[in-house]
Amino acid sequence: QVQLVESGGGVVQPGRSLRISCAASGFNFSSDNMHWVRQAPGKGLEWVAVISHDGRYKYYADSVKGRFIISRDNSKNTLYLQMSSLRPEDTAVYSCARDYWSDGGNWFDPWGQGTLVTVSS
Amino acid sequence: SYELTQPPSVSVSPGQTARITCSGDALPKQYAYWYKQKAGQAPVVVIYKDTERPSGIPERFSGSTSGTTVTLTISGAQAEDEADYYCQSADISGTYRVFGGGTKLTVL
């Protein structure tokens, strides 16, 4: 079945870097745009970044622009998020999601269960 | 940056109709999507393209749009509908996605 599994989260000090991953299975990963979405503890969903199916186009939320880099390796069916200059306000569960197209619209489906990133000294 | 505005909470009794609104300047130009999220679970889309319902979503869920506001309606809300609901759309260019702040639906 279509599945996304994130990994690599953990506790990191402010100002440091961390890379998280998302392993995809059950669909043609190289054909789909992919997103990262985060959710701070007890807060709402926040879109973080998107990468085109071939990796050529990348767009970021203002809150992470210049600090985070989204990338992908289609040969490994894996999506990445390199996070630098981390701040306490970046603490959140980070989930990857496929950009699913159907019936003339596109939405996030499926989602992974997420990986928790905690930025704290 | 572009924002979508939702009420923080909505409360209804079982069997009543729940309505959750979402406002944004680009909504006349960009489709809206509604997600249901229960605690500890991934969001699931319940309405796409403003008014369409995916297969497997109960008929009591419907969507409507008027100008810069879209509305999720749950007719005859049930206890299992209690969850957080998020609208999602894109900015006017269609490039940047955005979520509303979320609405906690209580059915009691």
Image (spheres, coloured by chain):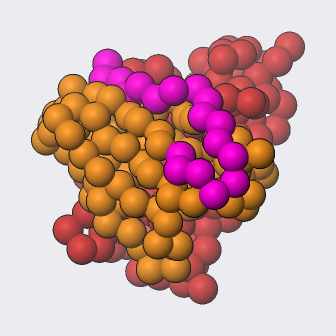
Chain colours: A red, B orange
**Horizontal relation, residue B3 to residue B28: left or right:** right
Q: Can you tell which quarter of the image residue A33 is in?
A: bottom left
Q: Residue at x 71, y 16 (%)?
A: A88
Count of picture labels = 0
Q: Residue at x 41, y 36 (%)?
A: B21
Is residue B50 inside the magenta stretch? no
Q: Nearer the viewer, residue A45 or B65?
A: B65
Is residue B14 inside the magenta stretch? yes
Residue B36 pos. (x, y %) = 58, 53
Name the quarter where the N terminus of chain A is drawn. bottom right
Q: Main secondary structure of the magenta part?
A: loop
Q: Residue at x 36, y 24 (%)?
A: B3
Q: Can you tell which quarter of the image residue B92 is in?
A: top left
The region drawn magenta spans B1-18
**Horizontal relation, residue B39 to residue B30: left or right:** right
Residue A25 pos. (x, y %) = 57, 78
Residue A115 pos. (x, y %) = 73, 48
Q: Nearer the viewer, residue B77 or A30?
A: B77
Residue A24 shows in the view: yes
Q: Nearer the viewer, residue A117 or B80?
A: B80
